[in-house]
Every structure is written in structure tokens, then in C-alpha cells.
Amino acid sequence: MMVSRVAATTAALALSGLGVLGLQSAASAGPAAAAKPKPTPSASPGSNCPNPNGHYPPGQCKPKGNVGDDTVEHGQKEHVHGQDWQPNSNVKVYAQSTPIYLDTFRADSAGVVDGDVVIPASLSLGAHHIVFRGLAANGKAATVPVPIQVIAATGAGGGGNGTGIGPLPRTGAEIAAVGLFGVVLVGAGGVAVAGGRRRRLAA
């Protein structure tokens, strides 16, 4: 009888201990056991935009534009480059303050635009922009301005000597030579007149 009571007590204590351990394990798991939200994928360096599956965060693939030279002259050929535009769409390029249409380029299958435009003579000197206008990767209209500075062409506005610094002053030697030449001409004219008179008198 005594043995059965001891066995029953031992079994009860063992079951109680297992229950306590189970509660402690559940408590320690706590929030960690809950499902974690999946992180939003981000574009890796060099990735093409847009992501075909649309997994990039909003604004990850905004259209971009740049130029070969930010200081230009009238008539100069300027290289333009854009990326992250809607693939196979048209991108128009303007020069402005007041918009001057330059050309239209077709984006390739990766949304890249490449081409050359000519800086128009009607664009005043000073600060302006080369402006890209087209569709972003998400299909919405987008405008990307790139600042440029228009300067006077090298050698422009001179006095015709090709140096751009105006006509050179005459020296004293040049003036003396011109004066001597004039004296010679006057003397030759006098001789001719005198010879004509002698011929008339002899006749």
C-alpha cells in the first residue's frame, strides 16, 4: 500500500515538471514564433528598370538624363543620354528656358536613350536646360531637366583678324610708308602733266 502511494506521488511530480517545462518553452518562444513579414526586394546595383515583376519599391526607377558637356557653344553637337524610360517609347529632347524642340529618340528595350543634338543659334547665352520628356517606366509622363551653360563661340565678335581681339593698331613705320607712297604718286602725276604741256607746245 505504501509502495503504491510513493509511486503515485512520484508520477504526479514527474507530470508536473513536464508541464512547467512546456509552459516555459512556449513563453520563451513568444513573438518570435509569429510569422515574420517578408522584406521588400530592392534593386541591386546595375539592375535594369523596370523590374518585370514589379518588385522594386516605388520611385526606385525614376527616369534619368545627362549630357556630354554642360558648357556648350552655338552650333555645337551635344550628346544626350537617358535611362529608366519606358522601353520602346519615344523621348523628346528640348533646349529651354523658352522650349526649343531639338529631336526625338526611341528608348531601347532596357529604357535607354542615346543620341546627338545641335545647340541652336537662337538659344541666348547663359544658363539653360536640356530637357527630356517622355514616359517613365510606370507609364506616367515624366520630365527630366539637365542644366547647361551656353557661351560665345571661340573667336566670335572680333574685328576680322581671326584673333577675337579686334583690329591691330597701325605702327609709325606703316604710316610713314603710306605717306611716302603718296608723295611718289603726286610726283609722278606732276611729271606726267609737265610732259603733256611740252608735247602740246611742240605741236
Image: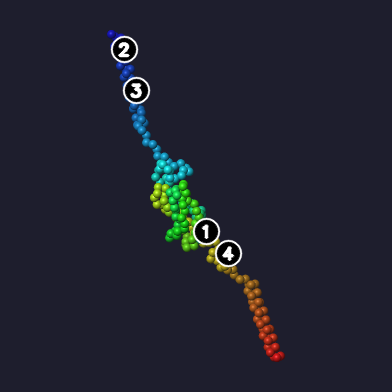
Image quarter (top left, top right, bottom left or bottom right) of the N terminus:
top left
The residue under label 4 is: 163
Which is more N-terminal, label 4 or label 1?
1
Q: Which colour scheme is used?
A: rainbow
Discs 1/2, front: 1
Distance in Å between CA atoms under marks 3 and 4: 96 Å
The reply to whether residue 71 is visible in this rendering is: no
**165 left or right of 109?**
right
Sequence-wise, the earlier of marks 1 and 2 is 2
The residue lying toward the viewer, choosing from 157 and 110, is: 110
- Where is residue 44 drawn, in percent x and y? 46, 41
Q: Name the amino acid, label 4.
A: Thr
Q: Distance between the residues labelled 3 and 2?
A: 22 Å
Amino acid type, mark 3:
Leu
Vertical order, 61 against 35 (above or below):
below
Q: Mark 1 points at which residue?
A: 76
Q: How far apart are marks 4 and 2 (CA)?
A: 117 Å
Callouts 1 and 2 close, C-beta under 8 Å = no
Q: Do the residues labelled 4 and 2 touch (CB within 8 Å)?
A: no
Return the residue found at the far left: 1
Name the disc covering residue 7, or none: 2
Q: In this view, does 160 lie to the left or right of 200?
A: left
Residue matched to label 3: 21
